[in-house]
Image: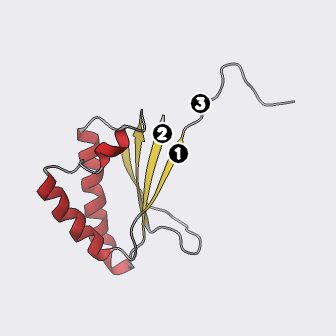
Amino acid sequence: MYLARFSYDLLPVNRDRALQFIQREVQAAQQKGLNARLLVPLTRGDGGAALQFEVELTSLDDLEGLRHRAGPAEDTREWMRAFSEILLRPPAVEILRVQEAEAGAGPAA
């Protein structure tokens, strides 16, 4: 399994609007059967993201479909443009592979 994490940097004044945009991403991903969530950091280091969107993928091929997750192409372009207007920089994207624990493997003594 893989996780795709999108980190957004924005001004505090735009937080509520950004939450609406990201919630739309979460709902669209969930409608496609993906496990997705909005992450709100309680603490963050210097330069850390204000908000994050995370989605689980079974295959890296699923990543391409994320760009088309919010609906028809024209609608998606419009809300992505509106969202980008409040971002301080393009979102940082991390792709992580989830390492499953091996069966029977316990802590080393």
Residue located at (49% from left, 62% from top)? 41
Provide the secondary structure element on which disc 2 rests: strand
Give the image quarter of residue 109.
Answer: top right
Whole-percent x, y for residue 66 in the image: 31, 47
Q: Earlier in the sequence, mark 1 or mark 2?
A: 2
Q: What's the residue type where badge 2 is placed?
A: Tyr
Q: Which residue lies under the disc numbered 1?
A: 96
Q: Which residue lies under the disc numbered 3?
A: 100
Give the image quarter of residue 44.
Answer: bottom right
Q: What's the residue type where badge 3 is placed?
A: Glu
Do labels 1 and 2 touch, CB within 8 Å? yes
Q: Nearer the viewer, mark 2 or mark 3?
A: 2
Circle 1 crowding by C-alpha within 10 Å: few under 14, some 14–19, many from 20: few
Provide the secondary structure element on which disc 3 rests: loop
Give the image quarter of residue 33.
Answer: top left
Residue located at (40% from left, 74% from top)? 89
Residue located at (78% from left, 31% from top)? 107
Provide the secondary structure element on which disc 1 rests: strand
Whole-percent x, y for residue 83 in the image: 26, 68
Give the residue furthest to the top.
104
Residue 34 visible in the picture: yes
Judged left or right of residue 33, residue 37 is right
Q: Which residue lies under the disc numbered 2?
A: 2
